[in-house]
Image: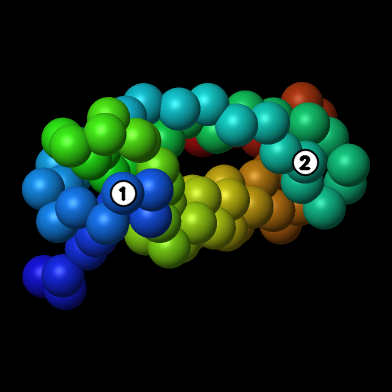
Amino acid sequence: MHDIHCPNCGSSDIQPRTVKDRLRASDLRGEIFELALQLPVWTCRACNLCWQGQEAVAAVEAAYQNALVRRSPSRITTWNEPHF
């Protein structure tokens, strides 16, 4: 694990944790949907600052891309098509 320091006070007494979050996004058809995901965050024990790093950005992007694949038009059936 790389050495992480608080961007506020410079302390290295950092606690990683994961928080649940929900984000709104839209698919390629413009339909809005929600993503439920868990994001990594950092908390400084010295000054209590809590922040998200690049890991959180990567987690959001991965969740969004996975949701788009699941929602792709080729994977969606209409009510007229047979459902097995």
**Residue farthest to the bottom?**
2
Closest to the observer, 58 or 33: 58
Q: Secondary structure at mark 2?
A: strand
Q: Horizontal and vertical percent for residue 50?
A: 35, 36
Q: 10 Å neighbourhood of mark 1: few (<14), some, or many (≥20)?
A: few
Closest to the observer, 53 or 69: 53
Closest to the observer, 76 or 46: 46
Give the numbered dot on residue 9. Answer: 1
Observer-side mark, 2 or 1, equals 1
Q: Amino acid at mark 1?
A: Cys
Q: 10 Å neighbourhood of mark 2: few (<14), some, or many (≥20)?
A: few
Residue that appears at 34% across and 35% down: 49
Q: Is residue 57 visible?
A: yes
Mark pair 2, 1: CA separation: 38 Å
Residue bearing mark 2? 26
Give the numbered dot on residue 42. Answer: none
Q: Is residue 41 above or below residue 19?
A: below
Residue that appears at 77% across and 41% down: 26
Colour option used: rainbow
Q: Horizontal and vertical percent for residue 59?
A: 42, 54
Q: Horizontal and vertical percent for residue 57?
A: 49, 56
Q: Is residue 13 left or right of residue 34?
A: left
Corner quadrant of residue 15: top left
**Residue farthest to the right?**
30
Q: Is residue 49 left or right of residue 69?
A: left
Q: Amino acid at mark 2?
A: Ser
